[in-house]
Image (cartoon, helix red, strand yellow):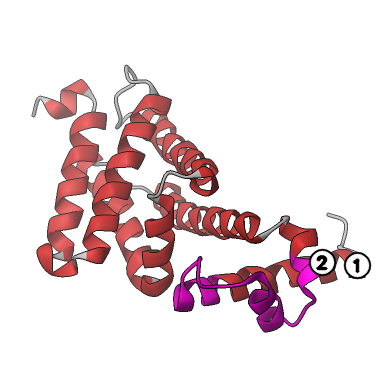
Amino acid sequence: MQELTTRQQNKAETRHLLLQAGLELFVEHGYEGTRAVEIASRAGVAVGTLYLHFGDKAGLLQAILLQGASELHERVMEVYKNPPSDPTALARAHIEAIVQFLEENEKEAHFLLAYASRRDSASAKVIDSIVEQIEHSIIAGIKMGVYRPDINPALAARAEANMNLGLLTWWMENPQRATREEIIETLTKFRASGLHTSQERGR
């Protein structure tokens, strides 16, 4: 692989600094309460640099949401590198990976889930990205023979994405209403019941 040039490295570092500064300020003051110039200042760059990289503040928000979705996806797909052979155990490991990621990044996750749930133009692409990621996990399970092959992975992924997003957003806003185990068990049963092979469901 060809090494990055100094210019490419600087560009990537600047982008990282803006993403980090934007996330920190959005968490601290909310999206509406944060100005582009404040983000640039915290990142140590000119505000024009933010516009150059992301177009505007909304573009930065979308990039932050997509980055969060990508990091979550990487965590979940670790489960499929050495997966349990039992379908229910696989479904549970998948859900546990999601919940653990949210717990480890609580403040950021609260913000990201809230904005992803808004269903506006900034979050639409993020939802599509999450759906695609879940679809990959379903296809992986089908190839392993533990998830049913007679289901449309894209439709199943969209149904699961909306269910997970809704429930997890609610739980992070109301943690006293359900325990961690209740959330994991509920989402595991829904995932397993919908994706198990006919043989597994009949047991």
Main secondary structure of the magenta stretch: helix
Any part of residue 18 in sight: yes
Query: How many discs appear?
Result: 2
Q: Which residues are magenta?
A: 23-50
- Judge whether 19 appears above or below 161 on screen: below
Residue at image location 91% in from the left, 65% down from the top: 5
Q: Amino acid at mark 2?
A: Lys
Whether residue 34 appears in magenta in the rendering, the answer is yes
Q: Which mark is residue 98?
A: none
Residue at image location 37% in from the left, 25% down from the top: 155
Q: Are marks 1 and 2 in contact (CB under 8 Å)?
A: yes
- Judge whether 85 appears above or below 143 on screen: below
Q: Which mark is residue 7?
A: 1
**Residue picked out by circle 2:** 11
Whether residue 154 appears in magenta in the rendering, the answer is no
Any part of residue 90 in sight: no
Residue in the foreground of this view, choosing between 158 and 203: 158
Q: Amino acid at mark 1?
A: Arg
Q: Position of residue 34 (x, y in %)?
A: 55, 73
Quadrant of the drawing holding the C terminus: top left
Q: Is residue 140 left or right of residue 41?
A: left
- Judge whether 61 appears above or below 94 on screen: below
Label 1 to label 2: alpha-carbon separation: 6 Å
Quadrant of the drawing holding the N terminus: bottom right
Q: Residues within 10 Å of mark 1 (few under 14, many from 20)?
A: few
